[in-house]
Image (spheres, rainbow, N blue to C red):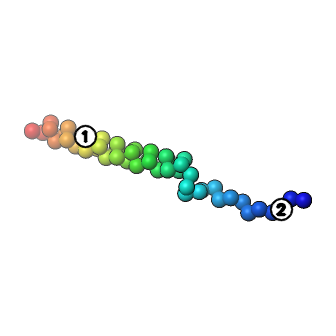
Amino acid sequence: MTTHRAPKPLADPNRPVERAVTAALVLAVLAGVGWIAGMLYTVAGWSM
C-alpha cells in the first residue's frame, strides 16, 4: 500500500542552481551598470 506524501516545494533555497541564477543576475546587473558608466564617460569625453 502506498502512503501519502506532501509534495516537495519547487523552490528550495538551498539548491545550488538558484544560487547560480542569482549570481548570474547580479553579474548581469553589474555589467549593465558598467556599460552605462562607460557610455557616459565616452559621451562626456566627446564634449571636452
Q: Which residue is mark 1?
A: 39
Looking at numbered disc 2 in the image, what kind of residue is underneath it?
Thr
Horizontal side of 43 relative to 36 (left or right) equals left
**Total numbered circles:** 2
Compare marks 1 and 2 and give the one earlier in the sequence.
Answer: 2
Check the image and name the residue furthest to the left.
48
| Relative vertical location of residue 46 with respect to residue 15 in this rendering, above or below | above
| Relative vertical location of residue 44 with respect to residue 1 in this rendering, above or below | above
x and y percentages locating residue 37 in the rendered image: 25, 44
Check the image and name the residue furthest to the right.
1
x and y percentages locating residue 45 in the rendered image: 14, 38
Quadrant hosting residue 40: top left
Callout 1: helix, strand or loop? helix
Label 2 crowd bin: few (<14), some (14–19), many (20+), radius 10 Å: few
Quadrant hosting residue 28: top left
Horizontal side of 38 relative to 26 (left or right) equals left
Q: Which residue is mark 2?
A: 3
Callout 2: helix, strand or loop? loop
Looking at numbered disc 1 in the image, what kind of residue is underneath it?
Met
Residue sitting at x 54%, y 47% = 17
* Quarter in which the N terminus is drawn: bottom right
Q: Nearer the viewer, residue 42 or 2?
A: 2
Residue sitting at x 16%, y 41% = 44
Q: Nearer the viewer, residue 22 or 36?
A: 22
